[in-house]
Each structure stands twice: as structure tokens, then as C-alpha cells.
Image: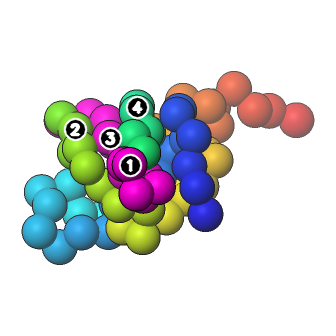
């Protein structure tokens, strides 16, 4: 699965301080060999050069959805 800028993703890289965290794709880069890597922005920083196989699409709902839930009343 390829990702676009502003997609929300979960990083799976045991060597990264952001392993398991949800972030936003801020940049995509394609090498001359056709491989795509990504720069992912997190609340506390960013991770560059992330391969596609280390990413998983995140749920569409933001992590901090408590404020959104308060507005919904029936």
C-alpha cells in the first residue's frame, strides 16, 4: 500500500523511538530505483527514510477524540 502526504500511519520499527506511534506522512521520496520512503511527523519529532513495509494505515479517527465526542448529543 502506498501512502500520500497527510495520511495517518502507525510506525512499526523496533529501532525507532517512535515505534508503535501514530504520525502523519509529511513527505514522500522516490529513489532512482523506484523505492519509496517516507518522512513521518509525530508530536515529538519526525522519522525520515521510513520504508513502506514499516508503516500501517492508522484509523481515521484522531488519537485525541475526547473533545469530539463531547459535541455529539442525541
Upstream in the sequence, badge 2 or badge 1?
1
Picture quadrant where residue 24 is located:
top left
Assess disc 4: are there few (<14), some (14-19) or many (≥20) residues with their C-alpha within 10 Å of its C-alpha: some
Which residue is drawn at the image coordinates 47% and 55% (left, top)? 34
Q: Nearer the viewer, mark 2 or mark 3?
A: 3
Nearer the N terminus, badge 1 or badge 3?
A: 1
Residue 55 point in image, percent of width and height: 42, 62
Q: Nearer the viewer, residue 43 or 48?
A: 48
Quarter of the image where one finds residue 23: top left
- N-term mark: 2 or 3: 3
Badge 3 is on which residue?
39
- Which class describes the residues within 10 Å of circle 2: few (<14), some (14-19), or many (20+)? some
Coordinates of residue 70 in the picture (x, y in percent)? 63, 31
Check if mark 1's residue and mark 4's residue have beta carbons within 8 Å.
Answer: no
Name the element at disc 1.
Answer: loop
Q: Is residue 67 above or below residue 4?
A: above
| Left or right of 20, for residue 26 | right
Instruction: Please state the extent of the stretch shown in magenta in the rendering.
Output: 31-44
**CB atoms at circles 2 and 3 under 8 Å apart?**
yes
Q: For the residues carrying marks 2 and 1, which lies nearer the camera in this image?
A: 1
Residue 59 magenta-drawn?
A: no
Which mark is first along the chain, 4 or 1? 4
Q: To which residue does mark 4 refer?
A: 26
Helix, strand or loop status at disc 3 = strand
Task: Work out which quarter of the rendered image holds the C terminus and state it.
Answer: top right
Q: Are marks 2 and 1 in contact (CB under 8 Å)?
A: no
Q: Which residue is mark 1?
A: 32
Amino acid at each position: 500500500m502506498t501512502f500520500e502526504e497527510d495520511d495517518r500511519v502507525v510506525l512499526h520499527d523496533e529501532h525507532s523511538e517512535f515505534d508503535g506511534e501514530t504520525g502523519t506522512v509529511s513527505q514522500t521520496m522516490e529513489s532512482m530505483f523506484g523505492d519509496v520512503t517516507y518522512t513521518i511527523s509525530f508530536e515529538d519529532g519526525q522519522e525520515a527514510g521510513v520504508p513502506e513495509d514499516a508503516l500501517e494505515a492508522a484509523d481515521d479517527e484522531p488519537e485525541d477524540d475526547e473533545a469530539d465526542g463531547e459535541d455529539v448529543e442525541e
